[in-house]
Image: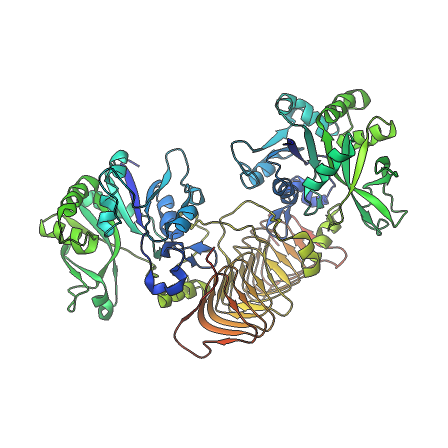
Amino acid sequence: MPYKIVAMILAGGKGTRLESLTRKVAKPAVSFAAKYRIIDFPLSNCANSGINKVGVLMQYEAVALDSYVGNGEKWGLNGVHSFTATLTPRQTEDSAKWYKGTADAITQNIDFLDAQNPDYVLILSGDHIYKTLYNEMVDLHISTGADATISVIEVDPGEASRFGIMAVDKNDRIVEFQEKPKVPKSNLASMGIYVFTWKTLRSYLKEDEKSETSDHDFGKDIIPTMLGDGKKLQAYRFQGYWKDVGTLASLHQANMDIALDNRELNLFDDDDTTKIYSEDTHSVPQYVGTKGSIKRSIANQGAIILGSVDSCVISNEVIIEEGAVCTRCVIMAGARIKKGAKVHNAIVAPEAIVGENQEINLGKADVILVSGGSYK
Amino acid sequence: MKRVIGICNLHDGPDLGPLTENRPLGAVTFLGRYGLMDFALSNLSNSGIDRISVLVEKNVRAVRTHVREGQTWINNTKTGYLRLFFNEKSIGTPRFNTDISNLLTNRSYFEDETADYVLITNPFMLTSCDFRPFIDAHIASGAEASIIYKHTTKADTQYLNCGMIEVGKTGFVNKIINNSGMKKIADISLGTFVFNRDAFEKILRLSRDVSLLYGIRKMVRYCIDEKMLSLFAWEFSGFVAPILSLSDYVNQSLKLLDYSSRSQLFLDNWPVYTVTHNTPPALYGPNADVKNSFIANGCIIKGKVRNSIISRDVVIEEDTHIDNSIIFTKSVVGKGTKVNNVLADKYVRMFECHEVSGEPDCFLFIEQGAHI
């Protein structure tokens, strides 16, 4: 790579809308698609893009997430010029404070970035499901001479008022930013993925730090200020599958997209260039019993399927007992669905137990959460 | 603390016919996910033995690919290690390529070790065995070496040609002979030994005067016959799956589909470690119909599978029927294909509308990479 780049993954959020799934664990560490955790996606994308220096910014329930990220080995980020760094709020010579916003999280780690002295900084979110190589976006940032490049995705015009919307000119240069507008001027939504020229961003962060009215947020503060100053902000049009899994419904839907093999997000690609890496468990291969059945589903090693499974995501060490029926369920590690139980349209938390002959959410269209024991 | 070094011996193992033609037995795929040596390495690891040497007889590439840096089985990667010993010079003379000549070739590395005991085990007697009580019993016995045996009532059909031991009243081995299947009840050596360090080195030295063709097991037998070694016998009462032939391999694999067998080999708190291949979960299509089978990660299953073991990254297309078969990694069973009593090696492609069948007692073997 002819330039130096560091990726910073914002992984500090609580993820309140995931209810008890994030009671003991940060959202990026929530399980996804039977064997992954959400943060595997940005971390694997970095690895696949050749971006081997990654800071992971953590705040809420950082312990489990930190021990999962570890030295970055799971994504190959432990080589001679690679690392993952856990960046939590900490006591310094001057103060001890929490991260007040997405931009403040970076500001508090300016020393870390200065030590790396990168040309560019890639800001990512730890709770998005997508496969990409960031190189094309960085190349666009360099070739257009932008100060910041923002990844955008086309959304349904009716939905546009839920997002941060970018109005662009004919060269995709951003001319206006609207946060959740009533009357959207385009259908290009910000994905919360930014490339910044480090020197420029650094000076804006320093200014933002002084402001008492700022929320210290990229979307609300840094981007509008840069735009107001006439800085060059470029839109990068993202193609492909991308999902923010911030709610139970969207987490469930993203899981279903994979179970039902719609191949928009293909984990079964032979192409190694966008493979998603994760932790592997020491489990026996999955076993389907003489009376079991499984279709339109994905299942991880260690699962034991003795009942009936249709349109489900089955994690490791899950046991579906005889006579149990699961449809449209996301069943997380170590959960057990006992004999004769019927579960529909549910996310079953790790280690949760659905009792014998219990019936959950049958015939309902809304996704519910079956809470479990402690998250491991 | 006692210092024990572990050896996983890939020499002197049984011949599994075509499965071991191009790879050592230890690297043969098992249950769609493991290499056979994973069980021995995990026993060492779970028993707290963190310094492991693997004696590689041949095809060091296949072993290296499987164990990589060894971290899978090593607890502390600074104080522990998993390394491969290989005897380059003996490649051209396989009869002289014994475990002892391998150890002697790499003698300087071995002699550098500070260790009180040497535990040597093998990849063909599959068990989940805690070596710690075995080592304790060895030390308490005062013997120079100890051996693990299994008491069986089926020696006439199982464990053929394995060492059969005669244990004296004091618990020491008087004699080791070949199990020729004449008796039903016997005490069978599982080929796992622990030696006092000096006794082990004595055997290595002595072997040069006795026969260059002798490996460790033969030297132990010789020393017992000549009354030169005190060998304590320790009984293992747990489950053993002996993989001594190709038919053993098939039968023992399929037997583990049965929960009562599986739950004896895979114990709680005794994980069997293997390397990660970064495969996605298995995907089942709308017409997938699977019963009584193991499915490894990375598989795409769209057809009918019965009583079978499907390894990593296998694709089973629509309108297929796989029964009583073992399919190795990255093979493809194309649309409309029927597969019965088949053992398909890696990268096999079975195309549309074929029927590929063996017999229940004589599986059809399909070699690696074959297109049918």
Q: Residue at x 62, y 53 (%)?
A: B268
Q: Is residue B372 left or right of residue A230?
A: right
Residue nearer the viewer, A95 or B64 = A95
Query: In the rendered view, would you say A234 is above or below A21?
Result: above
Query: In the rendered view, would you say B255 is above or below A66?
Result: below
Q: Is residue B258 left or right of residue A302?
A: right
Q: Position of residue B344 (x, y in %)?
A: 64, 52
Q: Position of residue A339 (x, y in %)?
A: 59, 72
Location of the N terminus of chain B (image quadrant): top right
The image quadrant that residue A139 belongs to is: top left
Q: Residue at x 42, y 43 (%)?
A: A70
Q: Is residue B90 visible?
A: no
The image quadrant that residue B10 belongs to is: top right
Q: Position of residue B363 (x, y in %)?
A: 72, 55
The image quadrant that residue B307 belongs to is: bottom right
Residue nearer the viewer, A266 or B200 = B200
